[in-house]
Amino acid sequence: MRSEMIEGLLDEGVAADAGATDVSGATVRILTLLLAELNPLIGTLALRALYVRSLYLAYASFERPGADRVAPDKRLLDLHQDLVSRDSAQARGAAQALLVALANLLVSLIGEPLTDRLLRKAWGNLPVAKSSVVKSL
Amino acid sequence: MKNKVPIPRLPSGVPGLDVLLGGGLSEFSFNIIAGQPGSGKTTLAHQMMFALASPQRKALFFTVLGEPALKMLRYQQQYSFFDTAKLDDAIRFVNLGEEVLSGDFDRVLARIVQEVESFEPAFVFVDSFRSVTQVAGAKGQPSALQYFVQHLGILMTSWQATTFLIGEYHLLDSEAHPVFTIADGILMLAQSLTQNSVVRKIQIAKMRGQAAIAGLHTFRIRDDGIQVFPRILPVGAHERHANVPKAARRPALSMGVPVLDDMMGGGLPAGYSLLVAGSSGSGKSLLATAFLAEGARCGEKGVVAAFEMGPGQTHNPCLEDLIAGGHVSVIDTRALDLSIDETLFALTEMIKTTSATRVVIDSLSGFELALAPAFRDDFRESLHRMVAVLTALGASVLMVSELEDRYTDLRFSPYGAAFLTDAIIVQRYVELAGSLKRVMAVMKMRNSPHSHALRLYEITDAGYVIGERHPEMDALLTGHPRPTSAIASS
């Protein structure tokens, strides 16, 4: 359900024929909202560690031979550059994998109720979130 | 003083703790929860926070550099008090790691104030504030602890927030002295290891403006959080023995052994404590069962704390029937690190729940072995407290004690329990004509006439059968019985 919700967020935020730049923009926006919600709760250090772990998990299946890994210290800028360098479908897949990995990582650490509560707080004000995808959490 | 400011007491949400605090937590107080790692500080803080917080009286929990916030949330939600529905509306967690790492304590305080202004909490928690001071020490700011705590105390009191600082401190910790001076309340937690047993204790080292109960009190951490077992006597328990009503004014409870009732002057006066001391195999547990069975026959409930066997292992069909029939409840005594106060709590809760009037403790030796080693030194004092509490509740208490059968030295119990109890029945073996015979006597019955006769008895399928005094022999307890006629002629 969480995966479907994230897919729905991306679908509603980015038109089906949109390019990688639009996919990246929507992804960074969605991610930023969640990180902003997490930051005061767990602190910058833990936030960075979670992000790095999510990148590691997500990009295992989206690594491209010869391409640089997304550097965690550059964080969102680097992610943006990586996504826009892909074709649209690949960018969408990588973005979704990253968001799902982060959500699942949170579930494994603090459980579903707390994670869903955080996701709802982070994404509840997105226009797309007014649809059932976030409310269903 | 007239018109003194009233200080509301807030229920802590920790069973047993409010008794120690003298009624609850003082509103707007500035408190410290201190103790070594693993002593339960964060759990205590969370339990209080989830009990105290509501959308009208919110709580802010600041995490610093101690336990990572993610782990704290991961583990604390295992307790039943962790209510996710309270998060955001009533409780908010804020991490101060970045501000603390900067070493700028004005920045830390500014962030706290900013969050407090924004969320307007009635309760503020900082876990762990020692991390703050350790960073300060590393940056060459030795007085930072006092500075930080003093300012925080002033700010939080001005904000009318009841505040709790959590830190790995000991009462003798010199670094903590300035903090302890500033605090209105200090709750010290400790866990001590004796042999293979760990015992957790709490001490209210300071509580301004209210009569907290001094001393160390045991507590246990379970799935539903912390449970404190206050080490107290009920009101008036000290005067109990001096003012004990005449037995004749109390209804007498039948022991379930007819002749024995006669020997006791009609039975055991209600609310009395009785020590049944006897040699191994002399039938002490059977007498205790008869006492409970007689209660069941009269419509009275019973409670048994059986320390020498687990539930369902009584090897006593009558007792098992009583338990199965709901006439008798059993206290779980399987833990090996019990405190007497924990056992007492279980007994009193069971007595209140079932309205039981008859209590059996079988036996004192088993009870002592079930206690954590740290409590065995205080066993006599603990027994005194237990008897006082149980009888103050109106229960009649029968305690079984193994009697070391030495003919020349009659000791009713190795714990000095004879002094503590209102009545004593002793059961012994004597050698007569080459075989062992059982004899019993009522040795003590406070404020009540009773028989002093040493009576022969047997245990049959029908239970106790008490006979007469031995018609021909005397001086049975000396180990050298003589014919009565010989004594008469000498």
Image: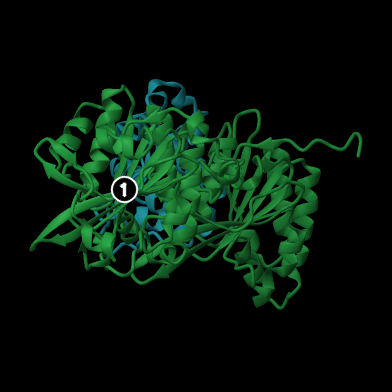
Q: Colour of chain B?
A: green
Answer left or right for A44 relative to B295: right
**Image x and y of residue B169, in percent:** 60, 67
- Callout 1 amino acid: Ala
Q: For the N terminus of chain B, which image quadrant?
A: top right
Task: Write the residue at 66% across / 44% down.
Answer: B22
Task: Write the residue at 52% across / 46% down.
Answer: B46
Task: Write the residue at 73% across / 75% down.
Answer: B142
Q: Where B91 falls versus A56 (above or below)?
A: above
Which residue occupies the foreground of this view, A111 or B376? Answer: B376
**Image x and y of residue B267, in percent:** 36, 34
Identify by letter the chain in cyan.
A
Q: For the C terminus of chain B, which image quadrant?
A: bottom left
**Image x and y of residue A27, in percent:** 42, 41
Answer left or right for B6 relative to A62: right
Which residue occupies the foreground of this view, A130 or A103? Answer: A103
